[in-house]
Amino acid sequence: MSSRQPSSKPDLYVVARIVKELSDNGSMKRTQLATATRLSYDVLVRYLGWMNEKGFVRMDGEENVVLTEEGHDVYERLVEWILEYVGKLRFPRF
C-alpha cells in the first residue's frame, strides 16, 4: 500500500510510529507530530483521519492530537502481533 492511501490499507508501521510519538509526548500539534514521525503533513493528516474514524486518536479543544485509550490498546496488540509473526520491530516498544 502506498502511504498516500491510509483509508484503505494503512501501513501499520506508520500507524505505530504515530501512536508511539503520541504516547511518548502526550498531545501534539499536527505539524509537530508530522516532524516527529518524519511524515509529510498531508500524509499525516490522511492517517489521522483514518485513525480518528477508528477511535485511536481525537482532537482536543486546542486542535492537539490526543491518543485515546483504544489507541494505546491497539498499539500493544500490534506490537505483540509483529513480534509473534514478523519476529522483530522496526520501532522501539514503549
Image (cartoon, helix red, strand yellow):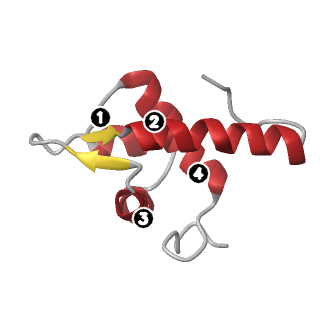
Towards the viewer: 38 or 15: 15
**Where does the image place residue 8, in percent across and percent down from the top left?**
55, 77
Q: Residue at x 42, y 56 (%)?
A: 44
Q: Are marks 1 and 2 in contact (CB under 8 Å)?
A: yes
The earlier-in-sequence mark between 4 and 1 is: 4
The three-letter amino acid code for the residue at tag 1 is: Met
- C-alpha separation, residue under disc 3 versus residue under disc 4: 12 Å
- C-alpha separation, residue under disc 1 versus residue under disc 2: 10 Å
Label 2: element kind: helix
Say if 56 sits above or below 49 in the image. Answer: above
Q: Which residue is mark 4?
A: 14
Q: Is residue 33 left or right of residue 6?
A: left
Q: Are marks 4 and 1 in contact (CB under 8 Å)?
A: no
Label 4: element kind: helix
The three-letter amino acid code for the residue at tag 4 is: Val
The label nearer to you, 3 versus 4, is 3
**Where does the image place residue 43, in percent across and percent down from the top left?**
44, 62
Say if 15 sits above or below 68 in the image. Answer: below
The earlier-in-sequence mark between 1 and 2 is: 1
The earlier-in-sequence mark between 1 and 3 is: 1
Q: Which residue is mark 2?
A: 36
**Where does the image place residue 64, in percent across and percent down from the top left?**
22, 40
- C-alpha separation, residue under disc 1 versus residue under disc 3: 17 Å
Q: Is residue 29 left or right of residue 8?
A: left
Image disc number at residue 28: 1
Q: Residue at x 56, y 44 (%)?
A: 74
For label 4, count other residues whose C-alpha is less than 10 Å away and answer few (under 14), some (14-19) or many (20+): some
